[in-house]
Amino acid sequence: MHTKNLLITLSTLLLLASATLYAKTPKEPCSTKVECDAMAEDLQGKIDGVRAKGLDNLTREEYINYLHLKKKLLAVSKVRTAQAKAKTAEQRKIIAQKDAEIAQENAKQAEYRKINKKLDEIGSLLK
């Protein structure tokens, strides 16, 4: 009976710890490129500091904090990647719009050349 209670208590603590870690990780850690870059640099510095101390020399709490830092850095990285993809998609959209405008202008120019050619033919017939 004592073992069963101990297992239930440990399971509850693990569930609480994982929920706490999940709650500490925001869905959107940063919103702008500059903010994300600064946050990523700060997190990487903290992670490097922990690694310099040596992962084998960490207490359990320090190791959990280290894992939290890595998870947060991963979240920032994902946001940065999503921002870059969105920017690339926006740039492609602008390029497609410019290509369409150029195609319309080329069609107008071709129409004007066609009209000018006909006018030249009419002018030469009238002479």
Image (cartoon, helix red, strand yellow):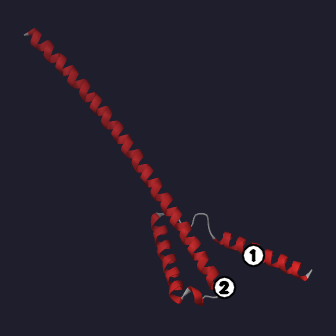
Q: Is residue 31 visible?
A: no
Residue 55 occupies which quadrant of the picture?
bottom right
Label 1 Cα crowd, 10 Å radius (few <14 / some 14-19 / many 20+) = few
Query: Which one is nearer the viewer's eye here, 56 or 74?
Result: 56
Badge 1 element: helix
Badge 2 element: helix
Q: What residue is rendered at 80% in x and 78% in y?
A: 10
Report whether 18 appears left or right of 92. right
Query: Which one is nearer the viewer's eye here, 105 or 81?
Result: 81
Please, what is the three-letter code of the amino acid marked with disc 2?
Arg
Residue 26 occupies which quadrant of the picture?
bottom right
User: Residue extending furthest top?
Assistant: 126
Q: What residue is rendered at 77% in x and 77% in y?
A: 13
Residue 98 x/y as whole percent: 34, 41
Q: Which residue is mark 2?
A: 60
Residue 60 x/y as whole percent: 66, 85
Q: What is the total number of numbered labels drawn onto the structure image? A: 2
Q: Is residue 91 visible?
A: yes
Query: Which one is nearer the viewer's eye here, 119 or 59?
Result: 59
Please, what is the three-letter code of the amino acid marked with disc 1?
Leu
Compared to residue 116, the image places residue 106 above or below, namely below
Q: CA distance from mark 1 to mark 2?
A: 13 Å
Compared to residue 79, the image places residue 105 above or below, namely above
